[in-house]
Image (cartoon, rainbow, N blue to C red):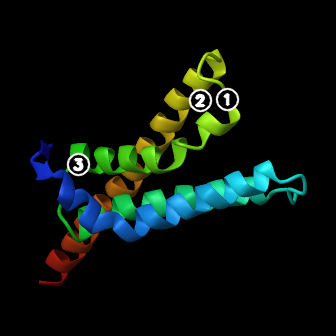
Amino acid sequence: MNIFSKKLKEYFTAFRVFLAVVFILTLINVILRLSFDLPPGISSFLILVAAIMTSWAGWKSVREYGYDFRQTAFVGFLFFLATNWSLLIFHPVSDVLFYILILVNSFLFVMFASLGGLLAKQFKRYQESKNSDLD
């Protein structure tokens, strides 16, 4: 199955480590939220690490695999899927807040991956212009 000119297997192969880390971070967050002793700030810290991992994956998708903007955004969508399974644990499907969280989270993960990809493209252009100035 091709998605934006790449097979789904290519996306999973390229980002399996990133996806595994984000999935494990989400699992840790769920376990801590279900326990009665949640350390203050740990949930925010885990979300921040997941956002950094998503941005790093966007960077890597452009620098190492030559992905374009649509493909990088899809990488962010995969990360969204790796984390949002946990929303079903804390929110009933009939809850309107559930759907708002889904939309906001999907937008944020796509944005972080795209931002990482954009930074990688800008960095590449900067390096190319710097190298051409030296010639």
Q: Which amino acid type corresponds to the residue marked 3 in the rendered image?
A: Gln
* Along the viewing direction, whichever of 35 and 3 lies nearer the viewer: 35
Residue 134, horizontal then vertical, whole percent: 18, 84
* Along the viewing direction, whichever of 70 and 25 lies nearer the viewer: 25
Foreground mark, 2 or 3?
2
Q: Are marks 1 and 3 in contact (CB under 8 Å)?
A: no
- Residue at position x 19%, y 66% in the image: 65
Foreground mark, 2 or 1?
1
Per the image, label 3 sits on a secondary structure element best described as helix
Mark 2 packing: few (<14 Cα in 10 Å), some, or many (20+)?
Answer: some
* Along the viewing direction, whichever of 122 and 130 lies nearer the viewer: 122
Name the residue carrying label 1: 91
Q: Earlier in the sequence, mark 2 or mark 1?
A: 1
Name the residue carrying label 2: 101
Name the residue carrying label 3: 71
Q: Which amino acid type corresponds to the residue marked 2 in the rendered image?
A: Leu
Disc 2 and disc 1: Cα gap in Å?
Answer: 10 Å
- Residue at position x 35%, y 58% in the image: 58
Disc 1 and disc 3: Cα gap in Å?
Answer: 30 Å
Classify 15 as above or below 81.
below
Left or right relative to 72: residue 106: right
Left or right relative to 46: residue 108: left
